[in-house]
Every structure is written in C-alpha cells, then in structure tokens.
Amino acid sequence: MAQDKNNLSEDVNVDNLGNNTDEFQEVFFKAIAQRAVENPDQAIEELERCLELKPNNTAVFYELAKNHIDLKNYSKAEEFLLKTLENPRYKNNINIHKQVFYVYNMQKRYEDAIEKAEFIAEENPVYFQELANLHLLKDNYKEALVALDRYDAVEGIDEFRDDFRMIIYKEGSMLKTGIKFFKNRFQNSIEDTRAATSLMELYRLDNSPKKAIEIGEILEENQVNDPELYVEMAMAYLVSQNSDKAKIYSKKVVQSLTLEEKDKLKVINTYKAFAMNHPEVQDDFVSVLDSALSSEKSSSSKAELGEFYKSRDKEKALKNFKSALRNKPNDFKLIQNILQLEMELGNYEDAVVTSSKALQSFPAQGYFYVIKGLALIELKQHKEAVSVLEEALDYIFDEDLERNVFLALAKTHQVLGNVEKAAAYDQKLKQKSN
C-alpha cells in the first residue's frame, strides 16, 4: 500500500494565510514548529486554538490532518482531509487525495480505498498497482487483472507485474486465463522468455506438462538458454515421469550459478518426492545432488543429500551435512543433524567441538549443552560433563530432555563417587516420572 504521509509536498499554501490576525499567524507557526520537532500532540493543541480564531481555515484543517496521521488517529485525519478538499482550490489535488487513500488503507476500508485509487490512477498510473493489490485482498481476481492491464497499457510489461499476475492466476483458480494471456504474449514475441516460462508453469499446473515441454523445445530450437527454462523443463519432465529427461534438466538446475536457492529447492523437493515413490530412480536423484557445485548456491542440495542418506549411509549423510554447514554456519537444523550423526557414529570428540561452536552462536540452547555433556561422558571426562549438564538445566524447557539430563547427572555423579548428588538427581528423576 502506498504510504505518502511523509513524502508529500506542502500542498496547502501556508505562506499566504489570508487576512488573519497576528495572533493567528503566531499560533499557527508555533504548531508548524511543534510538528517539526515531532510533537504532534502539542501541534494539535495550537491548531485547535487557530480554529477558535479562524473556524474554517483550510491550512489549519490540512495541518490537523497531518498531525493526526502522525498519531495514527486515522478517523480524525480523514475528517480534516475531507474538509481540506471542500476548498475548491484543492478539491482535485492529487497529493491530498493520496493522503485520504492512505488513511482508508490504514482503516482497512478497502472499498473506499479502491474508489480513491481509481481517481488517483488517472494521473498517477502507479496506483493501478495499488488497485490490483486491493482487489486481490478482496478476492476480486478479475478486477485485479484489469488494473494490471491498465498499468501495462501505460508503462509496458514488467517482471513484478508478471509475478503478480501469476499469484492471481493461482489463487483465483484462473490457470486457463493465465495460459491465454501468456500464450498471446509468447506468440507475439518468441523472445519474451518470461512469458514462455510463465506459460510453461501454468500448463504444468493445469495438468498439461507435455504442452509445457513443447514450449520449452521451441525455446531451445531458438537457442534460448535461460536458467528459468531449465527449472520448468525439469518440473515438466518430473510430472510426466520421464526420469531420463528429468535427470538431465535437474542437473542443469542444481549446477546453475545464477538461479536462486528457491528455484533449486523447488526442483530438488519435487525430484525427492518422485524418487521416494519410484525406488528405481533414487540413484539418479543422488547423482543430481552430487552434481551440485561446491558453492553457497548448492548448500540446499548438500542438505537434501544429507537427509536422503540419513537412514541409508550415516557417514555420507554426515559428510553432506557438514558441507552444507560451511555455507550456512548458523543453520540450527543442520547443526542438530550433524550432532545426532556424530553421536550415533561414536564421533564424540567431534561432537564436543561441534556443540562448543554451536553454543557460541546459540548460547541459550539447552540441546547443545546436553549433547556436549553426553559426549564428554562417553570420553570419560566426567567432571567436565557434570559442569556442562548442570549448566544445561538453566536452558531446558522440554521435560523429556530434562529427564535425560537428570539420568545422566545421576549416573555421572555415581561414577565420580558423589553419592549424595547422585541420589538427589535420582530423586528429581522420580518426581518427574510421577
């Protein structure tokens, strides 16, 4: 939503206040000064004094409106903005109408905001986008598209508006409308790759992956190598269950240096679901993930590969999780996965190092204290383990985890010969079990 309250010019001329008393002008400019130092309450008091001296002064109405906007008193702001517009000199002032539009939005009065945006858009076309936003909020999908069409007619096509259209086509169950729109664009200009890839996505979502592939093949025949094309080709072949082609295009996706992480994840997650339902292609899925470049762009691939191997080959899973962590050193889930595998594989020294590093970033996470303490127990460093586990209790809110700590502390104190402390933790454990 447009929020112009801080950016509008001073549309009501305060330099020419008309035939007013010196007292009026003095009080009025005190109000101006109070708003300048961000004291709208005091400014409003001064302006109300002005109204006592001059009840129908437009400049006072406008200043009152601005101060009430500052205080988020939107109904009062609206009252004074509408009084400002009653002055014939300002009734068509676009910037004042923008402020009225703003206060309607802030009050969630979307029908009124739509009417105001229609008026403003005739002079300022960017408000066609505001119209589209408002219509989408009210599930008026056709009207939202009309607003975007009107904006395109003035400004030409735009990537943001194309993305916005895709939201409308999906949310409004208007896939065929979207297909018609982007098909027309693509037929008029084969170089419009954004229209082509949008058309491919809509065909796929409309259960016509073969038509999506046909569009992709046309682009390839014209030597278009847009990475977005690879995403849509991979997705279409996955939906079509053409594993050989899906593998080829999925590799292009994960190897791309320019595609965003979300695009790679879309393909990876779809491929993973396909592989889980078709065991014969699981090796292909692993091959695709293995082909990802060792860069920040491939961290999602490494993490997914770790998840895939987690129940199959713990060593490979750990290797891939650690590779992903190099690019995302503060990824909580990755660290948890690494610690779990290090403990399961008996890599206790590594678990101590990993948990110690994790606590530098997450000093209030009880889980990392617990893992460190348990790893120290396995390494026979019982005194250090007790210290860490007792500190963990300050940060644990999960009862199951707390019981595990009490059990570990009871056993460790027993090993150290601290019979009374061992008994105390045994007692706490019993209390938790009741």
Image: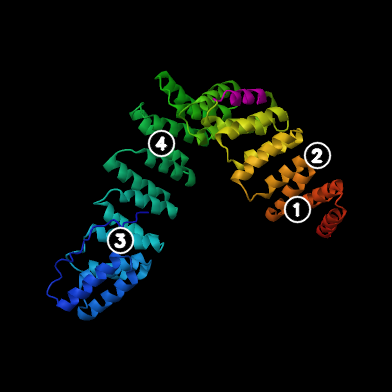
Total of numbered circles in the picture? Answer: 4
The answer to whether the residue labelled 2 contacts the one labelled 1, judged by CB atoms less than 8 Å apart, is: no
Tag on residue 380? 2
Disc on the earlier residue, 1 or 4: 4
Residue 39: quadrant of the picture: bottom left
Report if residue 354 lies within the magenta region: no
Q: Amino acid at mark 2?
A: Lys
Q: Can you say whether 12 is above or below 306 in the image?
A: below
Disc on the earlier residue, 4 or 2: 4
Tag on residue 99? 3
Residue at left offset 82%, top offset 47%: 412
Of the two numbered discs 2 and 3 in the rendering, the one whose residue sits closer to the viewer: 2
Left or right: residue 318 compared with residue 431: left
Foreground of the two, 372 or 264: 372
Q: How far, Cα to Cα, is label 2 from label 1?
A: 21 Å
- The residue tagged 4 is 180
Disc on the earlier residue, 1 or 3: 3
Q: Can you say whether 257 is above or below 55 in the image?
A: above
Q: Give the crowd class for mark 1: few <14, some 14-19, many >=20 residues within 10 Å.
A: many
Q: How far, Cα to Cα, is label 4 from label 2?
A: 70 Å
Q: How far, Cα to Cα, is label 1 from label 3?
A: 56 Å
Q: How far, Cα to Cα, is label 4 from label 3?
A: 38 Å
Q: Amino acid at mark 4?
A: Lys
